[in-house]
Image: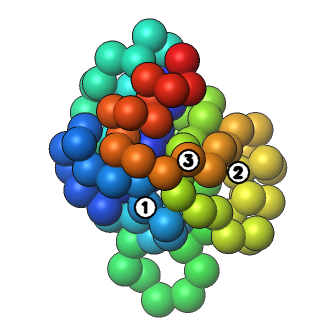
């Protein structure tokens, strides 16, 4: 399953430049079909969000996360959970179509 870090809950929303602090994660299946938008429960916490967000995504079964930009700490956390990551900019819908 794929997730797109976004600041909006719609598939036309733009990818977030702050992957771990994105407001939403839009989920798509392996065929690119939109499933749902998840609110990021860690977007506004004080302190590092990367470990909690990586765990949250792992528990949701995410295999690859797409965002406009990733911080190095978040990349390390994603790698530790065996979640792939890819920096792409555009709407959630367009980056998924380009990926597949």
| Dots 3, 1 in contact, CB < 8 A | no
Question: Residue placed at 74% from the left, 70% from the top?
Answer: 73
Question: Residue placed at 49% from the left, 14% from the top?
Answer: 30
Tag nearer the camera, 2 or 1: 1
* C-alpha distance separating marks 2 and 3: 16 Å
The kind of secondary structure element at disc 2 is helix
In the displayed structure image, the side of residue 24 where residue 59 appears, left or right: right
Tag nearer the camera, 2 or 3: 3
Q: Residues within 10 Å of mark 2 (few under 14, many from 20)?
A: many
In this rendering, is residue 46 above or below 33? below
Q: For mark 3, what is the residue?
A: 88
Q: Residues within 10 Å of mark 3 (few under 14, many from 20)?
A: many
Residue 49 lies in quadrant = bottom right
* C-alpha distance separating marks 3 and 1: 9 Å
* C-alpha distance separating marks 2 and 1: 16 Å
Q: Nearer the viewer, residue 86 or 3?
A: 86
- Residue 52 position within the rendered picture, expressed as x and y whole percent measured from the top left: 56, 63
Q: For mark 1, what is the residue?
A: 16
The tag on residue 78 is 2
| Dots 2, 3 in contact, CB < 8 A | no
């Amino acid at each position: 399953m794929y997730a797109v870090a976004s600041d909006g809950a719609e598939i036309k929303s733009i990818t977030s430049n702050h992957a771990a602090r994105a407001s939403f994660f839009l989920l798509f299946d392996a065929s690119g079909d939109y499933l749902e938008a998840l609110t990021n429960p860690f977007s506004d916490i004080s302190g590092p969000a990367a470990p909690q967000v990586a765990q949250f995504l792992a528990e949701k079964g995410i295999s690859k996360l797409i965002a406009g930009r990733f911080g190095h700490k978040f990349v390390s956390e994603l790698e530790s959970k065996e979640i792939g990551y890819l920096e792409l900019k555009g709407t959630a819908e367009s980056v998924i179509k380009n990926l597949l």
